[in-house]
Image: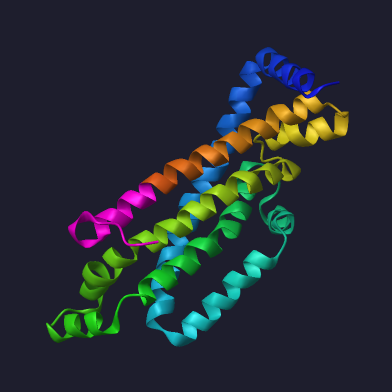
Amino acid sequence: MSVLDVLWATWEFLVANQGRFVELLREHLLLVFVSELVAVAIAIPLGVLAVQNDRASAIIGSAGNVAQTVPTLAVIALTFPILGLGFEPALVGLAVYALLPVLTNTIAGLESVDDDTVEAAHGMGMTWWDVMRDVRFPQAVPVIFAGIRTSVVLNVGTAYLAFFIGGGGLGVWVIGGIKLFSTAQLLAGAIPGALLAIALDAGLALVERQIGSADTPDGVAAAG
């Protein structure tokens, strides 16, 4: 069977299962975006804490590295004894795995702010919170957003593993296609995911450039 024949069979499979495709795509998008929101909501405050406290920085950094080095499927599987099967445990597992890129970039972005600028702000009577809100965060936003972009794109691929604990998503077709030796079903799940990752990466890259340009004086983007 030629490549064109395989692609045509995949298209026919998608057309014949449009309703199911929409359902699986919706589940996949929910897994990606909800878990990313959870990860961002946790990672940014942890990053702020790490910047302000050296001991907390060591603990948070180590915990984040451990979370990232554990295989994705293991992270998802570890939620099973506590939360059981379904969408919620898959969401928790994905959120844990999405933490590190956001956490790392949050710490890096906040620490990249020039010390003299921070000291000058304190000298003007600004409180810790004022400095964080008005000095550190505005300058760190492009770096933090770059971490969010990386995390989102990684999560698109990681979400396929939610199938193994009943979390749904496009992994249902990919893993099902492997089990049934159905290339059309496998590609019907894999190709939309790949296109989704490319589209999200391109869209977030555009937003990232806009943020970087807005953050640079006179609207001129920083070199590199």
Q: Picture quarter containing residue 40? A: bottom left
Q: Nearer the viewer, residue 169 or 188?
A: 188
The residue segment tinted magenta is 207-224
Q: In this view, does 14 lie above or below 65?
A: above
Is the C terminus in the top left, top right, bottom left or bottom right quadrant? bottom left
Residue appearing at x 52%, y 62% in the figure:
101
Residue 93, located in which quarter of the rendered image?
A: bottom right
State the quadrant of the N terminus. Answer: top right
User: Can you give x and y, in whole percent of width and height, for residue 33 in the image?
Assistant: 50, 44
Protein image colouring? rainbow
Q: Looking at the magenta stretch, what is its main secondary structure? A: helix
215 or 133: nearer the viewer:
215
- The spot of residue 128 in percent (x, y) is 25, 79
Decide which of 188, 166 is in the foreground and name it.
188
x, y percent for residue 121: 18, 80
Q: Does residue 76 appear to the left or right of 50 in the view shown?
A: right
Q: Which residue is drawn at 34% across and 66% down?
A: 140
Task: Indicate yes or no whether the magenta region holds residue 95.
Answer: no
Q: In this view, does 197 lie to the left or right of 44?
A: right
Most extreme residue toward the left is 124
